[in-house]
Every structure is written in C-alpha cells, then in structure tokens.
Amino acid sequence: MTLYRLYSLRGAQLVGREEILAEDDGRAALAARTCGRGDHVEIWRGDRKVRTVVPLNAF
C-alpha cells in the first residue's frame, strides 16, 4: 500500500486535505472521486502529482 494525499479544491481555494492508502494510482483516483469535496481533487504521491479528478458529488 502506498500513501497518497488528496487535496480538494474549489476553484483555486483549498477546501480539504486527506491522506489515504491505496494499492496503485488507479485505486487512489477512484477513492478521490468518491470521497473528494469541492470542484476537483488533486492526487499526490510524494512529490509527484498523479492526476486531477472531479468528485462524483461535484455536480
């Protein structure tokens, strides 16, 4: 398991931060889509930005 940091953003404003453990980048993205808040969630693994996703509850 790998530690990922999820940053929930509304526009450019940080509205939440969470650390999760996931098996890989894809599972981290799935977790971010289901638990993220805000307009989008940035997923980070160490100093590497994995991707940005839109949470399911964003709309």
Image (cartoon, helix red, strand yellow):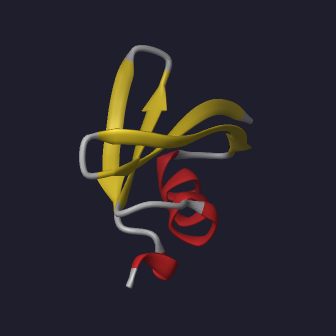
Q: Nearer the viewer, residue 25 or 4?
A: 4
Figure check: 48 above or below 35 = above
How many labels were placed on the picture? Answer: 0
Q: Where's the C terminus, which quadrant?
A: bottom left
Residue 49: give x, y in percent of width and height: 33, 30
Residue drawn at the location 31% of the way across and 46% of the way down? 51
Figure check: 49 above or below 55 = above
Q: In the image, is 7 to the left or to the right of 42?
A: right
Give residue 53's quadrant in the image.
Answer: bottom left
Please identify the residue farthest to the top as the structure is shown: 47
Give residue 54's quadrant in the image.
Answer: bottom left
Residue 37: give x, y in percent of width and height: 53, 61
Q: Where's the N terminus, which quadrant?
A: top right
Give residue 40's quadrant in the image.
Answer: bottom left
Residue 25: give x, y in percent of width and height: 48, 47
Please identify the residue farthest to the bottom as the structure is shown: 59
Residue drawn at the location 49% of the way across and 17% of the way down? 46
Q: In the image, is 56 to the left or to the right of 16?
A: left
Figure check: 23 above or below 31 = above
Residue drawn at the location 45% of the way across and 31% of the way down? 44
Q: In the image, is 35 to the left or to the right of 43?
A: right
Q: Nearer the viewer, residue 6 or 21?
A: 6
Residue drawn at the location 42% of the way across and 76% of the way down? 58
